[in-house]
């Protein structure tokens, strides 16, 4: 097994009980020792590791054991490829862990002659310009402060510095920043791409575009740095699933280095000695920055009894453990994921149809609600206009969901009612559809086609009035896992896009978190069907049609 003193130091500190690791970091050590460090084709480039650490400590800050540990693996080299073994680095930790400062210093080093690659351009990509410029500005300020002469002008060497680009004259390597707009930012010829705060990314589109330019310059690398966030079913969740799969050893020869720090259990929030599981900066002995950071976190924690609404933010950001305010979401994300179960046999069973057809120019959703005692099964489908899809920046993988049969992309000017009715007619071939429940939008368009098809239609005159009536049932369904969507990421997306607004009388109203980009049509179609869910039990379940001879 190969070794490096900084790697050995960090692992030994954990084994001696001087550092507290969360399970993912324990798994990382086991993974490295079992699958990576035993390879005969890899070695640590100790010279570059030392040069990088010295560079950071001269110009930026004293490095910490966990940072030196990561740096060592940035310069773990594959002999056969003569390039870095790890090409992707996921650095996920609680707020205050120094991710931006660390990536600023690393970026600066990579464009210097000490790295030794000419034209090694680096792009820093984030969801907003403010976030994208965080690390860029730190490099800019460091260079300006350390190199500025008395006239207030930047020197001619070794850097050419502006507010939009930093260039090392010796290597002709640059650092730029971009925002996550796939329509305007093509992949270039970067050597390295950094994605900052990926918890804002709803899908992989921008990442795919920017990483498409890698490989044209030696020593390609991608860094993902982030705390967790409140967006579910987005890129962050897929990244976490990938990390867990890698650490389990199920992915052979993975080139991702996952440094994932978080609490193992929500109960550890109340034990300050566990906080370093989420934030490696808090390991002892604490230096000045870490002391101030710990003091700040303690103040925020002590204020929680008096500021309970801040708990989801504190747990998600400081402890890197997603938590949602139960008064602002339909259900916690873990409960939504838990209902990802296969359907039982439903053929010939009675069901209630649900329809949300409010906006015929973007989305429309339909579905069938089945019920067996306290268990509910929601089989759904959606329609989306292609023009809306092409003109509205929806990050989820709509095209993939269409390929998977979860939705249909419509090329017409509107989502014609014929698409809706035909779907229900097709379902009648397999299931006993008793009626369809719809909101009162587009009633003039909807009613006649359903009558012509012989499908009973009930229109809810005041759709929002049923929200308060159904809220207790919905809460119970998710908490007790009494609802099943099947393996349907589209429906999970719909559900997670719903915000719960408390009304003055204490009842709940289900609204959209975002009117345009966070669609909820499938959830509201389910709401309409739930309004008449008790009627399903009036039929001879489960095989009312099975004994009839035609």
Image (tube, rainbow, N blue to C red):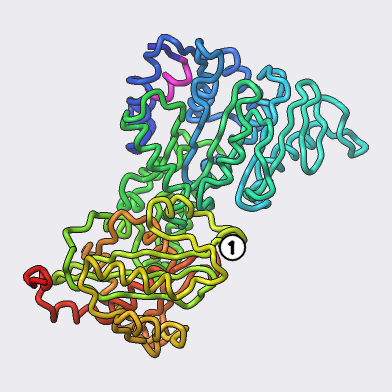
Q: Nearer the viewer, residue 240 or 291?
A: 240
Q: Is residue 335 magenta?
A: no
Q: Nearer the viewer, residue 185 or 408?
A: 408
Specify whether 345 is left or right of 75: left
Any part of residue 173 in sight: yes
State the residue at coordinates (53%, 50%): 201
State the residue at coordinates (39%, 13%): 39
Specify whether 411 is left or right of 51: left
State the residue at coordinates (40%, 86%): 448
Q: Is residue 7 magenta?
A: yes
State the residue at coordinates (46%, 47%): 236
Quarter of the image for the N terminus: give it: top left
Any part of residue 467 in sight: no
In the figure, residue 156 lies in which quadrant? top right
Quarter of the image for the C terminus: give it: bottom left
Percent x, y of residue 268: 32, 49
Q: Nearer the viewer, residue 316 or 465?
A: 465
Q: Residues within 10 Å of mark 1 (few under 14, many from 20)?
A: some
**Residue, far right:** 151
Percent x, y of residue 21: 36, 35
Percent x, y of residue 49: 57, 18
Specify whether 379 is left or right of 371: right
User: Measured along the vertical axis of the image, is residue 199 above or below residue 519?
Assistant: above
Q: Nearer the viewer, residue 458 or 275?
A: 458
Q: Which residues are magenta?
A: 4-12
Specify whether 431 is left or right of 444: left
Give the residue number, with chain letter if any, for mark 1. Answer: 387
| Helix, strand or loop status at disc 1 | helix
């Amino acid at each position: 097994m190969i070794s490096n003193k900084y790697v050995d130091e960090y692992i030994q500190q954990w084994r001696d009980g001087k550092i507290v690791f969360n399970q993912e970091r324990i798994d990382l050590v086991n993974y490295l020792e079992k699958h990576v460090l035993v390879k005969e084709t890899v070695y640590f480039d100790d010279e570059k590791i030392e040069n990088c650490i010295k560079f950071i400590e001269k110009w930026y800050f004293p490095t910490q054991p966990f940072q030196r540990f990561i740096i060592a693996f940035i310069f773990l080299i594959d002999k056969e490829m003569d390039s870095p073994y790890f090409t992707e680095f996921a650095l996920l930790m609680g707020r205050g862990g120094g991710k931006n400062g660390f990536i600023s210093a690393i970026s600066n080093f990579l464009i210097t002659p000490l790295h030794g690659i000419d034209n090694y351009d680096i792009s820093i990509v984030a969801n907003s310009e403010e976030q994208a410029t965080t690390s860029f500005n730190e490099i800019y300020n460091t260079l300006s402060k350390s190199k500025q002469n008395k006239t207030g002008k930047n020197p001619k060497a070794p850097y050419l510095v502006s507010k939009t680009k930093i260039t090392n004259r010796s290597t002709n390597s640059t650092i730029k920043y971009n925002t996550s707009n796939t329509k305007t930012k093509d992949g270039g010829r970067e050597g390295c791409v950094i994605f900052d705060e990926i918890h804002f990314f709803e899908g992989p589109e921008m990442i795919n575009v920017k990483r498409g330019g890698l490989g044209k310059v030696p020593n390609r690398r991608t860094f993902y740095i982030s705390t967790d966030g409140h967006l579910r079913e987005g890129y962050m969740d897929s990244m976490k699933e990938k990390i867990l799969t890698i650490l389990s050893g199920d992915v052979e020869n993975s080139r991702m280095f996952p440094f994932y720090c978080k609490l193992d259990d929500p109960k550890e929030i109340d034990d300050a000695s566990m906080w370093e599981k989420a934030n490696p900066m808090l390991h002892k002995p604490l230096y000045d920055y870490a002391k101030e950071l710990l003091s700040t976190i303690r103040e925020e924690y002590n204020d929680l009894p008096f500021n309970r609404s801040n708990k989801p933010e504190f747990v998600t950001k400081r402890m890197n453990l997603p938590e949602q305010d139960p008064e602002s979401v339909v259900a916690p994300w873990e409960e939504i994921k838990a209902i990802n179960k296969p359907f039982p046999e439903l053929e010939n069973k009675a069901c209630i149809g649900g329809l949300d057809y409010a906006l015929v120019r973007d989305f429309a959703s339909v579905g069938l609600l089945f019920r067996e005692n306290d268990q509910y099964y929601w089989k759904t489908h959606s329609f989306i206009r292609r023009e809306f899809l092409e003109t509205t920046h929806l990050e989820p993988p709509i095209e993939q969901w269409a390929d998977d049969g979860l939705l249909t992309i419509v090329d017409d000017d509107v989502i014609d009612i014929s698409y809706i009715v035909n779907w229900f007619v097709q379902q009648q071939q397999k299931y006993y559809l008793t009626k369809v429940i719809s909101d009162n939008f587009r009633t003039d368009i909807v009613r006649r086609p359903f009558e012509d098809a012989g499908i009973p239609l009930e229109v809810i005159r005041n759709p929002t009035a049923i929200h308060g009536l159904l809220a207790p049932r919905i809460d119970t369904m998710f908490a007790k896992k009494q609802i099943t969507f099947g393996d349907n990421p589209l429906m999970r997306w719909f559900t997670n896009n719903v915000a719960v607004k408390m009304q003055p009388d204490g009842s709940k109203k289900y609204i959209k978190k975002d009117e345009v980009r966070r669609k909820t049509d499938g959830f509201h179609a389910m709401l309409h069907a739930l309004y008449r869910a008790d009627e399903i039990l009036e039929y001879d379940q489960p095989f009312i049609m099975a004994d009839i001879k035609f």
